[in-house]
Image: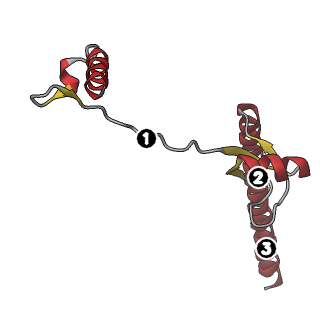
Amino acid sequence: MASTSLSWASSLLQNRNSNVSADTMKGTDRVPVFTIVAQKKAKKTRKIILKEDVAELGKKGQLMDVKAGYFRNYLLPMGVAQIMTPGLLKEMKIEDERIEAEKKRVMSSTIFVNYSLECILMSHMISNN
């Protein structure tokens, strides 16, 4: 019985190895060498934008990577975050550009007002002498 099992098992192994190319075989016994590749666990994170300040997470408008469960079970029901989409990213860039342009405009008007006040002060000082 043992010899029957052995011959059956070896013939099965031989049939399986007949499809294996010569480069996967090593040694004189022609035993196939198989490489086992372990796959990493998939990262389950979501890119989100915060709609409001969230304690210990971030400020409004920040882009964050959070775990999918945290987003699904806490942030989404509370309405404090939104999944990142290309449309939202484009909208955020436009808003940032608008804010930067407003800052530049305010800065230039501040410089102009400051210069005007200096001129008035200088002319007033000259007229008093």
Residue 121, quarter of the rendered image: bottom right
Residue 57 higher or lower than 43, as above or below = below
- Which residue corresponds to the image point at 27% horizontal and 26% vertical from the top-left? 6
Instruction: Say which residue label 3 marks.
Output: 123
| SS label for mark 3 | helix
Q: Residues within 10 Å of mark 2 (few under 14, many from 20)?
A: few
Q: Which label's residue is closer to the chain start, 1 or 3?
A: 1
Amino acid, disc 1: Ala
Residue 28, position in %: x, y? 9, 28
Q: Which of marks 3 and 2 is nearer the N terminus?
A: 2
**Residue that numbered label 2 is attached to:** 70
- Residue 31 placement: quadrant: top left
Which amino acid lies under the numbered mark 3 shown in the image of this protein?
Ser
Residue where numbered disc 1 is placed: 38
Circle nearer the viewer, 1 or 2: 1
Given residues 81 and 43, the one toward you in this image is 43
Q: Distance between the residues labelled 1 and 3?
A: 81 Å
